[in-house]
């Protein structure tokens, strides 16, 4: 059980680092070009999905830091109710981070390909550094989502190991 707790701490630290790095890449990304005598500056604020992804990353990183704090201060001897809460919050965090990364990827694909019907120009032919940084931030988000899925498996295991395999929703010690 100690190795499981250590791996959970390592996973949470990696997730926090990836989410913060992704937020920094998104938040500080901007590029300026002169297009037809117009000074054009592109930032993440032009893409609403990236702005939402920035906030999602910040909240998910803060949640994982709080969970690390709870584990650090000896709340590891949790009750089943707190393990259920941790399991459900881990699941919710995975779904929200994955959905945000997918929305940002879909919005960014529109920036790469453009849309004649929506009169949306291809940005990546003119703002290549911006597109590369956003692409790397989205890849980091997906890696963080995969690590959060693994963390969710660990959380589920630590919760459901308390229950008896023979009796439905009864603790092992109650049998």
Image (spheres, helix red, strand yellow):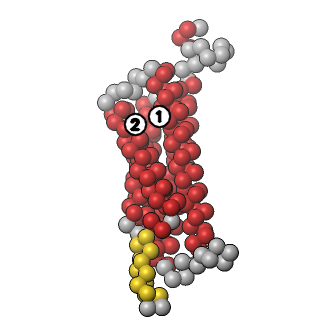
Count neighbours of disc 2 (C-alpha within 10 A) and say few if under 14, some if 14 to 19, many if 20 or more: some
Residue in the foreground of this view, choosing between 123 and 157:
123
Q: Residue at x 52, y 32 (%)?
A: 87
Count neighbours of disc 1 (C-alpha within 10 A) and say few if under 14, some if 14 to 19, many if 20 or more: few
Label of residue 66 in the image: none
Q: Residue at x 44, y 56 (%)?
A: 54
The disc, 2 or 1, on the residue closer to the chain's N-terminal end is 1
User: Which type of secondary structure does the marked residue at label 1 adopt?
Assistant: helix
What number of labels is visible? 2
Q: Seen in the image, is 106 located left or right of residue 134?
A: right
Residue in the foreground of this view, choosing between 44 and 140:
44
Residue 121: name its quadrant: bottom right
Q: Residue at x 47, y 88 (%)?
A: 35
Q: Seen in the image, is 32 located left or right of residue 149?
A: left
Q: Position of residue 149 (x, y in %)?
A: 56, 44
Residue in the foreground of this view, choosing between 167 and 29:
29
Q: Which residue is mark 2?
A: 67
Nearer mark to the viewer, of 2 and 1: 2
Q: Position of residue 114 (x, y in %)?
A: 62, 75
Q: Position of residue 147 (x, y in %)?
A: 52, 47
Residue 47, compared with residue 38, is above or below; it is above
Give the farthest residue toward the top: 175
Label of residue 4 in the image: 1
Q: Is residue 143 visible?
A: no
Q: Position of residue 59 (x, y in %)?
A: 42, 46
Q: Residue at x 42, y 77 (%)?
A: 41
Disc 2 to disc 1, how far (Cα)? 15 Å
Residue 162: name its quadrant: top right
Residue 120: name its quadrant: bottom right
């Amino acid at each position: 059980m100690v190795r499981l707790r250590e791996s959970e701490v390592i996973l949470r630290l990696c997730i926090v680092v990836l989410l913060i790095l992704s937020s920094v890449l998104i938040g500080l990304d901007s590029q300026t070009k002169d297009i037809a005598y117009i000074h054009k500056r592109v930032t993440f604020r032009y893409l609403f999905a990236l702005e939402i992804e920035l906030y999602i990353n910040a909240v998910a990183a803060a949640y994982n830091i709080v969970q690390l704090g709870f584990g650090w201060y000896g709340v590891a001897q949790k009750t089943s109710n707190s393990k259920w809460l941790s399991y459900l919050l881990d699941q919710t965090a995975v779904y929200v981070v994955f959905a945000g990364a997918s929305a940002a990827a879909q919005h960014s694909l529109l920036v790469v390909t453009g849309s004649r019907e929506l009169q949306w120009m291809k940005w990546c032919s003119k703002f290549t550094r911006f597109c590369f940084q956003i692409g790397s931030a989205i890849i980091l988000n997906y890696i963080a989502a995969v690590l959060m899925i693994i963390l969710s498996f660990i959380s589920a295991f630590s919760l459901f190991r308390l229950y008896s395999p023979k009796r439905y929703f009864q603790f092992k010690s109650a049998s």
